Image: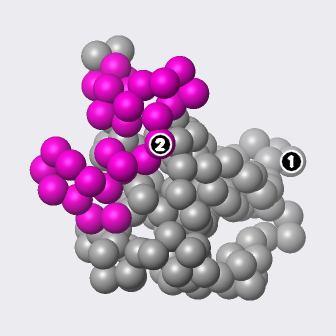
């Protein structure tokens, strides 16, 4: 389905907030944009970077994000989504990758959080960069969202 007339030519999302529900929704926005043929870039920084850290089967990574606004742990919030027949965190991230989202990680954010680049997931093609790289990637006719 082509993007609607007057729709932004690209969606650029700064994923800053480290809460599970906010990061999950940023992935949802990107997947929706991609589904209507609007390119999407996700720029992870600060607490949201935890979502891109490699993890074990049931620990670490996105499970280390902050609780939701309702106080649910990331694991409980994810289980609730699944029980309600909604996409889990892994399904949303996988969808974004499959649909061609550009996933960027802020190098300054990595240093600020004390996370090394080699700790990031290998199954997600991550482009390192900074704000200048992110802004250069954004479209003049696009939309920028801060989550």
In the rendering, at what x and y percent does residue 44 appear?
A: 56, 64
Q: Foreground: 62 or 134?
A: 62
Residue 74 falls within the magenta-colored stretch: yes
Which residue is rendered at x = 60% and y = 81% of the image? 108
Label 2 belongs to which residue?
A: 66
Relative to 21, 94 lies left or right: left
Q: Quadrant of residue 144?
A: bottom right
Q: Residues within 10 Å of mark 1 (few under 14, many from 20)?
A: few
Residue 104 falls within the magenta-colored stretch: no
Secondary structure found at label 2: loop
Whether residue 34 is visible here, answered yes or no, is no
Whether residue 61 is visible here, answered yes or no, is yes
Q: Quadrant of residue 134?
A: bottom right
Disc nearer the start of the sequence (1/2): 1
Q: How is the image coloured?
A: one colour
Which residue is rendered at x = 53% and y = 57% of the image? 47
Foreground disc of the pair 1, 2: 2
In the rendering, at what x and y percent does residue 126 appear?
A: 43, 75
Name the mark on residue 6: 1
* Magenta segment: 53-82
In the rendering, at what x and y percent does residue 68 appear?
A: 50, 31
Which residue is rendered at x = 61% and y = 56% of the image? 15
């Amino acid at each position: 389905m082509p993007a609607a007339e007057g729709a932004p030519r690209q969606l650029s999302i700064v994923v800053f907030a480290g809460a599970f529900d906010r990061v999950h929704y940023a992935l949802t926005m990107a997947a929706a944009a991609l589904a209507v043929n609007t390119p999407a870039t996700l720029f992870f920084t600060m607490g949201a970077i935890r979502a891109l850290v490699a993890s074990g089967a049931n620990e670490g990574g996105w499970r280390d994000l902050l609780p939701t606004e309702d106080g649910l742990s990331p694991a409980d919030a994810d289980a609730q989504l699944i029980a309600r027949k909604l996409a889990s965190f892994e399904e949303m991230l996988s969808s974004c990758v499959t649909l061609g989202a550009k996933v960027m990680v802020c190098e300054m954010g990595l240093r600020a959080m004390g996370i090394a680049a080699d700790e990031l997931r290998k199954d997600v093609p991550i482009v390192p960069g900074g704000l200048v790289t992110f802004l250069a990637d954004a479209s003049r006719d696009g939309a920028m969202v801060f989550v």
